[in-house]
Image (cartoon, grey):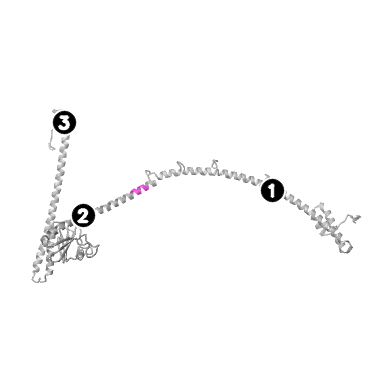
Amino acid sequence: MAQICISGTAVTIESLQVDDGVLAELLNAQPGERRADMVRRVLEVGARGLLTMGLGIDIAEVDARVRRSVDEVTTEARLQVEQVLAAARQTFGEHFDPDLRSSMVGRALDGFTQWRDEFLRSFNPDFTDSHTARFLDQVNDLLGPDGMLEGRLREALDPDADGSALARLSKSIDERFGELRDLLMHERGKQIEADRGTRKGFDYEDLIEDALREAVRSTGCVVERTGRVKGDLGAETLVGDFVVALPSDRRIVIEAKNTGRINLTGRDGILEELDRAMANRSADFAICVSARDAFPKEVGPLGVYGERILIVDEGDGTMLAVALRIAEMMLDKSADRKTADIDRSFLNERMQRLRQLAQLFTNNRRSLTDIKTSVENVHGSLEQIRSELLFLVDEISHEIERSSTKEPASAAVVHLRSGAG
């Protein structure tokens, strides 16, 4: 049995056993030293509750006791919270106080300082084992004096080294300049040749002009040089080198050629060119005079094609005078309508004979030219032989003078023998 002793307001309960799960759960949640105090509070709260339920206890007294109990609980809770906060503050300080070297922040700062020092040291060029120092050493090995880059540049830019870039470039430039020089020389040669051809053409035109004026002297004809004067076909058309105006107001145009080959027909043929020359110079007849035998073989030294005559004349004017006479005759015949009584067989026979004589004249002139060339060649050979003879005599004279200065006067006798002797 439980023994309960009451002394004033103090109640002592001994050997009290309560079988209540809620009370057991409440007390189990408390530490052992606080369980008795918790039982006391439970009895106080329970007693006050029973009194308020009709036992006649003063409610004011119950409120005071409850308030006191609440204050005690609050005070105790505040103390416990303060203790927890103090412990937390102490623990936080121990872990995060940067002034404590043992704290986590202190240790972290020490580690960061060491890491910073190591990091800066790894990039400090003053330390030979730092990254920056090793990088600078590699850069110096590559770009510094006698480095890899300088060596490679020296090899690549050595103009005397076989296979170097500069040697290949120099060789390529030399080849290009050589090609350019050859091209320029070729073009210059072509230009010189063209200038010579043009000069030949002008020189030949000068000969033809003199021959024309000589051929028409005292006939009342007028010779006009028109090779550089624009004609009726426009400013760009200069075809027709000379125009001979006859007293009958008829006009003959002359085209002078000094080329190696002259086509007969086609767009670049001489017959069509003579037609353009007649249109350009308002002429009634046309003559082409060539300095060389450049016409096709069927033309020969003299060919008549309607109002066009082709002749070969080196510049003495013989065939040109014949062509002018034929052209004037054909123009007069076309103007005179009374030609029914002309003996055409006679004319054909005479024209045939004229062509034969023209061919013979050309052949003889060519032979004479060949003979003249041979004579000039022989003359040149004789001059060369003469010079060599004089040179040999001078050498013999010098040798004799050299020998006479070394030997006595009595011994200075030279015996000359022929090659057969």
Q: Is residue 45 visible?
A: no
Q: Is residue 2 magenta?
A: no
Image quarter of residue 258: bottom left
What amino acid is labelled 1 in the image? His
Q: Find numbered disc 2 in the image and state the secondary structure of the residue it sits on.
A: helix
User: Mark 3 sits on what residue?
Assistant: 404
Q: Is residue 198 above or below residue 411?
A: below
Crowdedness near tag 2: few (<14), some (14–19) or many (≥20) residues, C-alpha within 10 Å:
few
The picture places residue 372, in percent across and down from the top left corner, at: 13, 51
Q: Nearer the viewer, mark 3 or mark 2?
A: 2
Q: Find numbered disc 3 in the image and state the secondary structure of the residue it sits on.
A: helix
Image quarter of residue 382: top left
Numbered badge on residue 95? 1
Numbered badge on residue 199? 2
Crowdedness near tag 3: few (<14), some (14–19) or many (≥20) residues, C-alpha within 10 Å:
some
What amino acid is labelled 3 in the image? Ser
Q: Contact, CB < 8 Å: mark 3 with mark 1?
A: no
Cα–Cα gap, marks 1 and 2:
112 Å
Left or right position of 223 against 189: left
The residue segment tinted magenta is: 168-174
Q: Main secondary structure of the magenta part?
A: helix
What amino acid is labelled 2 in the image? Arg
- Label located before the other in sequence (1 or 2): 1
Can you say which quadrant of the picture contains the C terminus? top left
Q: Is residue 23 visible?
A: yes
Q: Is residue 89 above or below residue 326?
A: above
Cα–Cα gap, marks 3 and 1:
129 Å
What residue is drawn where x is 11% and y is 68%?
A: 333
- Label located before the other in sequence (3 or 2): 2
What residue is drawn where x is 59% and y is 44%?
A: 118
